[in-house]
Image (cartoon, helix red, strand yellow):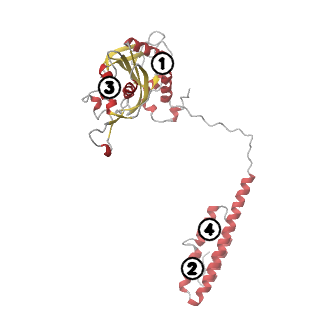
């Protein structure tokens, strides 16, 4: 209600108090109460504005006007506190009157599931543990020494180019000649080097984990997962490697799938070979006749393998005249796609629940 310009300041204050008291019963909650308080007592509230009249009245009337202002303000604050108590009591009554059916059995929370890559990694670890391998691990940020030098990857090898590998900038306090060069490990092979240096021979391990390379296209990701195996002992041959891969494929895919080697070059093995398995999607129990997934070849490439190069043994303190060994490696992401029929690599990394909820944890 607008104040009458003919009223005295005290009358205008009384008018505002009556307006306040009339509006107070309609306030039903705390936000409404706060809004009413701001409306009358806020920085630009109606009562606050009237206080500015103090300098316009004769000095003899200022004392009475000050008393009137304090009386109205105190009355409003008392009403606000009383109404706040009433609202709190009403809210408590409503809460106490609420009825809860304690016999109601709610739906159980939806259980989470392991990511298909995690499921695949754990299954690979179980398979190789049953074959007599230990599971080893290593750091993601690795010294160039273990990533390349100990593995017979020479300084001019393309893998050591910054276009292929993520190199870590040295901290300022390590910027001197003997500071180690660091990389995001491009493979899990450094775990093999560290294990041979620490434990010597014989050794039988698999090293699963996350690896990083500067690949980013439709069929590659800059972050991916590998598992590598290493077996070093006396009189170890390629026949042991092929038998192990046969046993792995049988245990992991549950079929009598064949394995074949194709000659290939890797600096840390000699001789080296790519190893393939028969395509499980077009396998009839004896042959894989070819399908879209194996590009009509009947075979699917799994990874690389070979006999450990004598230079690697020399770098890792193992006598190559006494011990021989083999190593292999393949992508866990690819194995997850083969095992679960995942059509695209990107599904492994997008975190789309519509995809991930299709895979239940074992």
Q: Quadrant of residue 262?
A: top left
Camera-nearest label, 1 or 4: 1
Camera-nearest label, 2 or 4: 2
Answer whether residue 223 is visible to the viewer in this image: yes
Local crowd size for mark 3, using a 10 Å CA cut-off: few (<14), some (14–19), many (≥20): many
Answer whether residue 303 is visible to the viewer in this image: no
| Secondary structure at numbered mark 1 | loop
- Give the mark nearest the N terminus, 1 or 4: 4
- Give the mark nearest the N terminus, 2 or 1: 2
| Secondary structure at numbered mark 3 | helix
Rendered image: mark on residue 36: 4
Q: Which residue is mark 1?
A: 132
Q: Which residue is mark 2?
A: 51
Q: Marks 2/1: CA distance?
A: 90 Å
Q: Which residue is mark 3?
A: 151
Q: Marks 3/2: CA distance?
A: 86 Å
């Amino acid at each position: 209600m607008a104040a009458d310009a003919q009223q005295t300041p005290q009358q205008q204050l009384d008018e505002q108090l009556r307006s306040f008291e009339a509006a107070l019963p309609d306030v039903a909650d705390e936000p409404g109460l706060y809004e009413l308080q701001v409306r009358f007592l806020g920085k630009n509230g109606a009562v606050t504005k009237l206080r500015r009249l103090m300098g316009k009245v004769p000095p003899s009337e200022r004392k009475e006007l000050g008393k009137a202002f304090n009386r109205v303000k105190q009355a409003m604050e008392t009403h606000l506190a009383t109404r706040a108590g009433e609202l709190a009591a009403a809210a408590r009554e409503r809460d106490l009157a609420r009825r809860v059916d304690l016999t109601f059995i709610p739906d159980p929370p939806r259980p989470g599931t392991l990511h298909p890559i995690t499921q695949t990694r754990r299954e690979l670890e179980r398979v190789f543990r049953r074959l007599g391998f230990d599971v080893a691990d290593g750091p993601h940020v690795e010294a160039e020494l273990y990533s390349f030098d100990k593995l017979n990857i020479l300084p001019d090898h393309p893998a050591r180019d910054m276009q292929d590998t993520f190199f870590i900038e040295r901290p300022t306090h390590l910027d001197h000649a003997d500071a180690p060069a660091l990389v995001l490990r491009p493979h899990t092979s450094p775990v093999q080097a560290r294990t041979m240096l620490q434990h010597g021979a014989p050794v039988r391990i698999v090293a699963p984990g996350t690896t990083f390379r500067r690949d980013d296209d439709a069929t590659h990701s800059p972050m991916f997962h590998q598992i590598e195996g290493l077996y070093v002992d006396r009189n170890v041959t390629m026949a042991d490697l092929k038998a192990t891969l046969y046993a792995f494929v049988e245990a992991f895919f549950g079929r009598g799938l064949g394995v074949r080697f194709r000659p290939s070059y890797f600096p840390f093995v000699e001789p080296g070979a790519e190893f393939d398995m028969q395509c499980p999607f077009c396998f009839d129990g004896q042959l894989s006749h070819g399908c879209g997934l194996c590009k009509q070849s009947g075979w699917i490439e799994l990874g690389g393998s070979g006999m450990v190069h004598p230079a690697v043994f020399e770098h890792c303190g193992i006598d190559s005249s006494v011990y021989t060994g083999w190593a292999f490696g393949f992508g866990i992401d690819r194995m997850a796609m083969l095992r679960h029929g995942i059509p695209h690599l990107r599904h492994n990394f997008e975190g789309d629940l519509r995809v991930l909820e299709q895979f239940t944890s074992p």
